Image: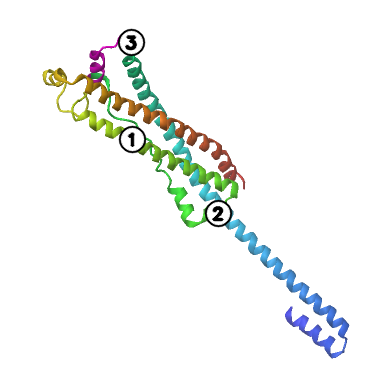
């Protein structure tokens, strides 16, 4: 093909047909430009196809992670609501007008559970991988921002939980320096020795420390509840958009 065009060009030059040569030259340039544009389009098509494959593969991983997070949230909320109901019941009984110290002591001795249900969003391997690789930038800007916001909200929730939990731990430690409750963290079961611990307590000090401890636990759940709901709502809004990407062939 190149030899063919070269022969034509040489013939026009030899015949001194300058105007036709110029016209031919312009046509040859146009053909070259068309060839370059076609090559670029094919290259862009191949690149877009490659990027589409990357996006779909990453989206599948994100969907799997978010579904797991959604299940985790449901289970956490069930556990939290169960423990929160116990704490709220304690609060209700402790604030009755005819409440006596013996009631609070019984609650502390036999009913109160020191453990607290944690919330940790650490299922972020897929997101961190596409973030570090830069492949997050292949997504539509609006969707990319939604993904960023969702995982940022997860981090915020985990941090809020950690801060609230640390305050509860401090109140729990302060309480347990002088008082106890039945559970796996004690070697003295219910019985004479256990009752003796409660036989000579400083009632005012006990009330203050128990109130601080139980109140801190209540605060943990109340503060973390809204954040968990926000994460769940964000996941519910994001999943259909991600599934649509995977569904498109």
Res. 97 mark: 3
Observer-side mark, 2 or 3, equals: 3
Question: Is 55 located above or below residue 70 in the figure?
Answer: below
User: Which residue lies at the image location 34% right of the left edge and 31% below the top edge?
Assistant: 117
Nearest to the eye among marks 3 and 1: give it. Answer: 3
Give neighbour class at mark 2: few <14, some 14-19, many 20+ (Cα, 10 Å): few
Q: Which residue is depicted at the point 47% across and 48% down? A: 127
The kind of secondary structure the magenta stretch mainly shows is helix
Query: Marks 1 and 2, Cα distance to the nearest angstrom?
Result: 36 Å
Question: Which color scheme is applied?
Answer: rainbow
The residue closer to the viewer here, 129 or 155, is: 155
Whether residues under marks 1 and 2 lie with C-beta atoms below 8 angstroms apart, the answer is: no
Decide whether residue 208 is among the magenta residues: no
**What percent of the width, then of the height, locates residue 156?**
44, 41
Q: Which mark is residue 165?
A: 1
Q: CA distance from mark 3 to mark 1?
A: 31 Å
Residue placed farthest to the top in the image?
98
| First reached walking from the N terminus: tag 3 or tag 1 | 3
The residue indicated by pointer 2 is 137
Q: Is residue 152 above or below residue 220?
A: below
Q: Are marks 3 and 1 in contact (CB under 8 Å)?
A: no
Give residue 204's position: percent from left, percent from top: 23, 20
Outermost residue toward the front in this view:
204
Q: Tell me what residue is drawn at x 35 percent, y 24 percent.
A: 83
State which quadrant residue 78 falls in.
top left
Q: Secondary structure at mark 3?
A: loop
The magenta segment: 96-109
Classify 10 Å Cα crowding around label 3: few (below 14), some (14-19), many (20 and above).
Answer: few
Q: What is the secondary structure assignment of the residue under circle 1? A: helix
- The answer to which of marks 1 and 2 sits earlier in the sequence is 2
Q: Horizontal placement of 163 versus 198: left or right?
A: right
* Residue placed most toward the observer, 50 or 240: 240
């Amino acid at each position: 093909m190149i030899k063919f065009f070269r022969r034509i060009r040489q013939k026009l030059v030899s015949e001194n047909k300058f105007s036709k040569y110029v016209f031919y030259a312009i046509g040859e340039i146009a053909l070259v430009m068309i060839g370059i544009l076609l090559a670029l389009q094919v290259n862009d098509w191949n690149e877009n196809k490659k990027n589409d494959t990357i996006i779909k593969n990453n989206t599948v991983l994100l969907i799997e992670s978010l579904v797991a997070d959604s299940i985790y949230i449901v289970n956490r909320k069930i556990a939290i609501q169960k423990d929160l109901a116990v704490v709220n019941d304690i609060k209700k009984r402790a604030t009755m007008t005819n409440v006596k110290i013996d009631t609070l002591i019984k609650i502390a001795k036999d009913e109160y559970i020191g453990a607290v249900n944690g919330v940790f969003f650490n299922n972020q391997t897929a997101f961190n991988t596409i973030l570090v690789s830069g492949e997050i930038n292949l997504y539509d800007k609006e969707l990319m921002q939604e993904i960023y916001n969702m995982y940022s909200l997860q981090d915020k929730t985990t941090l809020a939980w950690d801060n609230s939990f640390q305050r509860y731990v401090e109140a729990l430690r302060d309480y347990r320096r002088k008082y106890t409750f039945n559970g796996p963290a004690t070697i003295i079961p219910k019985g004479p020795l256990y009752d003796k611990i409660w036989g000579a307590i400083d009632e005012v000090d006990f009330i203050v420390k128990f109130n601080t401890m139980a109140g801190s636990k209540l605060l943990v759940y109340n503060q973390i509840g809204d954040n968990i709901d926000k994460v769940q709502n964000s996941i519910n809004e994001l999943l259909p958009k991600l599934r649509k990407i995977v569904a498109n062939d």
